[in-house]
Image: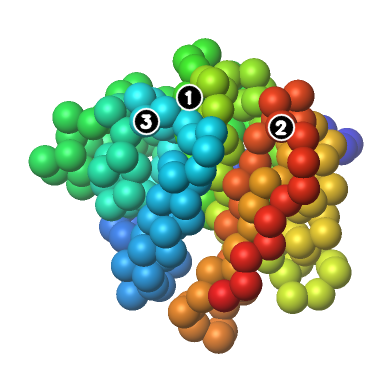
Amino acid sequence: MAEQMENGFYKRAANYWAGVPATVNGVLAGYADISDIDIESSKEFLDRILASSDPPDTNLALDCGAGIGRVTKNLLAHYFHKVDLVEQDAKFINAAKQYLGERNDKLGTLYQIGLQHFEPEKKYDVIWCQWVLGHLNDHDFVSFFKRCSKCLAKNGIIFVKENITVGDEVEYDDDDSSVTRPHKLMLKLFDDAELHLIETKIQGGFPDDIFPVYMYNLKPKRKYFGTYIYLED
């Protein structure tokens, strides 16, 4: 019974995204106007990571839940030699090749698969996960990041940018079959996945009618020991 419920959770999400247009407004659920400030804030966060004392290299990045490649085109392609994309919807994968335009030369491998099934095989300097983890149940969330940890290059990092609830409860969205988790639960799941939180920051400048958005810089515990930094707006 539990397995059937989980399969339904993923199937409903796939059906939802199958009906979403392959546009920036589509992948941002009607909030295309936040794209520029989103990218700018992510750029500042990534610049700080790359300027650290032990920065990741800039050979290969992985864009998880990439959609049409919005983050790849506007951010990752400016830093990395190649970017691999993971996206389960065929329509989005096909659109990414056109959307990237002159940045098409930065495209690496395109994986059409859900993150719950994705098995990374390359070594990545940065693994970027933005607005996709709500489509994983807690078990698959932890398993996915354990797999990611094994495929990080030297000094590699995992970047997460996600909606976070205001209270302490998980909120469910039946429309797109997703969950929005509280910050404390995100930290617990990162810990369960044996990830160490290096730095976190709350996204500023977004509309008041949407969830707060947190950015997280993470490394496997076996590679980093210390305290994390919380950056105020």
Q: Amino acid at mark 2?
A: Tyr
Q: Amino acid at mark 3?
A: Thr
- Characterize the local packing of mark 2: few (<14), some (14-19) or many (20 or more) Cα atoms within 10 angstroms: some
Q: Residue at x 77, y 63 (%)?
A: 182
Toward which corner of the image does residue 129 lie, by quadrant?
A: top right
Toward which corner of the image does residue 139 lie, by quadrant?
A: top right
Q: Residue at x 44, y 42 (%)?
A: 50
Q: Nearer the viewer, residue 66 or 206?
A: 206
Q: Position of residue 225 (x, y in %)?
A: 77, 35
Find the distance from the CA under tag 1 to the CA under tag 2. 17 Å
Q: From the viewer's perspective, is 22 left or right of 19?
A: left
Find the distance from the CA under tag 3 to the CA under tag 1. 9 Å
Is residue 78 something that shows in the picture?
A: yes
Q: Nearer the viewer, residue 131 or 38?
A: 38
Quick check: 20 above or below 1? below
Find the distance from the CA under tag 2 to the CA under tag 3. 20 Å
Q: Secondary structure at mark 1?
A: strand
